[in-house]
Image (cartoon, coloured by chain):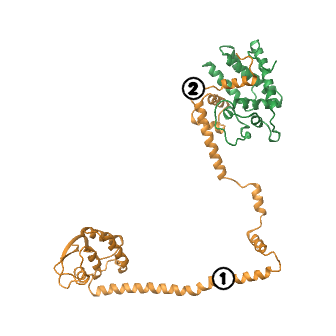
Amino acid sequence: MLNNIDFEAFIHKAAEHETSPIIHKNHPELSLFFDEMTGDLSPEVHARFVAHLATCPECQTQWQTLTKTFDEEEKTLSASARVSSLVELARRQTQPRFGVRLAEWFYSLWPAPGIRPVLAAAVASVATVAITLAVVIPILYNPIAATSGRVAVITSGLETLQGQVKSLVEGGDTIYANFDPASQLTLDELAQLTGDIQGITDSWQRSLIIAAYLNSHGVAYPRDLDWFNLSSYTIQLEDTWQSIARGKFGRPDTWPLIWLLNADRDFPNEALPSGETILLPSHRP
Amino acid sequence: MNQELLREDRLAFWDRLIHGESVEFEELDQLVTKLAHDASDEDRINSVLLLAAAQIARVGRRAMRRNLVAALRYWFSHVGTKDRPSKFDPRKIENCGLIDIMGLYLTWPEALASVLAAKSRTADYTALKRIERCLEEEYMKEWERLFGSSAPYTTTHGR
């Protein structure tokens, strides 16, 4: 059977026979694979493990996958935890300090030794002027700017206080704890709100948008206005938007909101047609 | 089943030889005992081949023992399948075993490089022929010793 074949082929045939697959009923647990990798298996268990793997293609695949993963992981870890070699450390030690290297670089720009002092003096002069500009000027001007800022804040505070006192004397609005005139709508905010409302014909929807806008901007209009419950108002002779806002709510500055609420009514700003009906936010009880 | 167990026993010994360890005759006694009973021709041939390799690993000269390890790595690397690394370095299999080399399809220089010191690595193809011849002689001897007849194998080497 085996006669007259080359011995090398004979050996190859033997190796093939030795490792030909066996249908195994049981396979080693995963922990054994890890123990084999770390060399923690006893000689007897290692021998069984090797014999099994050599004849089990399924476990061979698993072994190859695990070893490949571990190799890649090891490479990643060793790359991230790389310690400087002795050569690198030695090289760092022998390198001149940064200041020395900077001076060497500076001198290397002008190889002629006779010119160096002149150029050095020129560079020093330029540096002095630059430092003067960068340091002295801000020192001179900053206090003025800071004082101006503080004066502006105090002025604003005084204006606020005057407004509140005036309001109290006139017996107008109740000043709420969080009331801040500065939080009233600016012209830009009004323009934005107008843009949001444009095209909406339903007064109810417009009132919702106004209420939501005031809430989201923290605008402290009189709290007793309920934008979710609208009431109708018949325009009287010589009524204007401002006079209605003053008369109904005691706040003439709320007129733009009333005007926005009735934006579908194309009324002139100054002379409103008497007898027509508009919508107003109702008073909270 | 017995044949499979016998084969697994042998594989454990092959693994040790591939690692470069020696296997004592006493350890192979059980294998020889099993061989005397109901073993197939292939089991007998491969078991005697193992005994011959173990004999060289035990009593052979240093160069021959080294060549034996290289040859076993070479032969067993040509069975099975494995993803061979694109940049394969034979030095990484210096301490490898059976499952590490299966499917690597080593060339003889690679197999030899795995057992040689870096400075003495040469592609000595005659080393493979020498270890083949030596193993063949041991195989013949062991067969005759165990079974009292000539091995069921003749070479084309003209002997």
The label shown at residue A130 is 1
In this picture, residue A249 sits left or right of residue B32: left
Q: Which residue is mark 2?
A: A24
In this picture, residue B135 sits left or right of residue A221: right
In this picture, residue A221 sits left or right of residue B57: left
Colour seen for chain B: green
| Residue A241 image offset from top left, x and y in percent | 25, 81
Which residue shows up at 78% across the image and 27% down it?
B57
Residue B26 visible within the image? no
For the N terminus of chain A, the quadrant is: top right
Which residue shows up at 76% across the image and 25% down it?
B53
Colour seen for chain A: orange
For the residue pair A136 and A168, the one nearer the viewer reads as A136
Q: Residues within 10 Å of mark 1 (few under 14, many from 20)?
A: few
Callout 1: residue from which chain? A
For the C terminus of chain A, the quadrant is: bottom left
Callout 2: residue from which chain? A
| Residue A22 image offset from top left, x and y in percent | 60, 25
Which residue shows up at 29% across the image and 78% down it?
A256
Is residue B30 depicted above or below B71 in this figure?
A: above
Q: Which of the marked residues, 2 or 1, is nearer the chain's N terminus?
A: 2
Picture quadrant where residue B10 is located: top right
Q: Residues within 10 Å of mark 2 (few under 14, many from 20)?
A: few
Q: Residue furthest left?
A: A275
Whether the residues at callouts 2 and 1 have beta carbons within 8 Å, the answer is no
**Amino acid on which the number 2 mark rests in the picture:** His
The label shown at residue A250 is none
In this picture, residue A69 sits left or right of residue B111: left
